Image: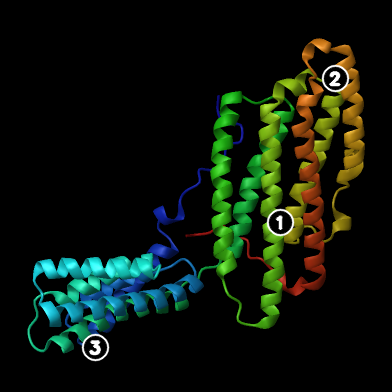
Amino acid sequence: MPDPLQHKERINPYMKFGARILKTGIAIVLALYLSELLNLPAPVLSGIAAIFAIQPTIYRSYQTVLEQIQGNIIGALVAVSFVLLFGNDIFIIGLAVMVVITINLKLKMDKTIVLSIVTVIAIMESQDGEFLNFAFIRLSSVLLGIVSSFIVNLVFIPPKYEAKLYTRITDVTEDILKWIRISTRHATEHTLLKKDISRLKAELLDLEHIYSMYKEEREYFKKNSVAKARKLVVYRQMIITTKKAFETLKRIHKFENEVYQMPEDFQRSILQQLDSLIRKHEQLILLHIEKIKSIEEIEDWDQDCLSRKELLAHFFEQQNQVDEMHDNLGHLSARLVPLISAVIEYDEQLEHLEKLIVSFQSFHKEDNEISVQYEED
């Protein structure tokens, strides 16, 4: 049976040609060019260093530059000390490398270990002329590569994660809501949905990663910082709401047989309730990017939607009837409490999301422009 969602295959952005690959290439070219311009004798060291310093955000790039500079200075100091005290025998080089690794681990600078080792080996290899001058030149070559990567990350194709985050939230939410629609109409294949639930779980984790990238993007003006902080709250709630939709889908999947055995009136109520919540979720996502101008212009999703209190009252009424009529089912309706709970929590999160979006647009309307593009990573 083909996948009824016909979902697009998610491709790891680091496994296709895109911004990060392009930036790495540019950083290497810049590092090699500057090395030749400054007549440094080992330009390859600058090229190698440039590879390790490329990061997905400017903030992380800045952190990496500081860490790599510290790590390489440590490596250079250890290398120089060992050569002056013990020489540069291959066993001494190995011992120096172990010392550098230990120091980096103690300082919790795990990411700098590889490049620090490169620095140690580059300085401690056989050399001609004055050793200290040789060591300084080698260290300078490595640091030049690190700085080159930072310049490239700062100037060339600075990463913009908001559009990417919104697009990914929209894609994942769309998949989940389609599955809910199909599941509530008993039109799913059990094994196919089970497989896609695993995929959706992984994509929700990827959402968290993209959100952290967006969170790390810095605003340089106070006015923009306030708007960014409120946007972060909105996007966090969008992710939470999508997770609640996912939790609802899992419980529909788990209790599919129990729902099917309930009275048709109850099944129809659950179907209408979920359809209303799904419409609301879809329209709130569009409202966030102002595809819908205002909350008043949205289709009235409440016409078939019970309040949370009414849904509970209706469920308990059905519960009593079912338990009286079908003693042999072993309190069938009681087993559906987790599903009803998930639907109510989903409704609560949608209500909270609506308030956050409306509030944000009221105070930061001019800051709510999102260039929604399919990212070209």
| Residue that numbered label 2 is attached to | 263
Left or right of 21: which side holds 98?
left
In the figure, 115 relative to 290: above or below? below
Per the model, the C-alpha gap separating discs 1 and 3 is: 51 Å
Helix, strand or loop at mark 3: loop
* Category of crowding for the residue at label 1, using alpha-carbon neighbours closer than 10 angstroms: few (below 14), some (14–19), many (at least 20): some
Give residue 312's position: percent from left, percent from top: 88, 35
Helix, strand or loop at mark 2: loop
Query: Which mark lies nearer to you, 1 or 3?
Result: 1
Residue 237 numbered mark, or none: 1
In the figure, 267 relative to 305: above or below? above
Given the image, on which type of amino acid does mark 2 rest? Pro
* Category of crowding for the residue at label 2, using alpha-carbon neighbours closer than 10 angstroms: few (below 14), some (14–19), many (at least 20): few
Left or right of 137: which side holds 320?
right
Residue 38 numbered mark, or none: 3
Who is closer to the viewer here, 212 or 12?
A: 212
Give residue 104's position: percent from left, percent from top: 34, 69
| Quadrant position of residue 285 | bottom right
Tell me which label, 1 or 2, sits earlier in the chain: 1
Residue 269 numbered mark, or none: none
Asked if residue 351 can be seen in this view, the reply is yes
Given the image, on which type of amino acid does mark 3 rest? Leu
Tell me which label, 3 or 2, sits earlier in the chain: 3
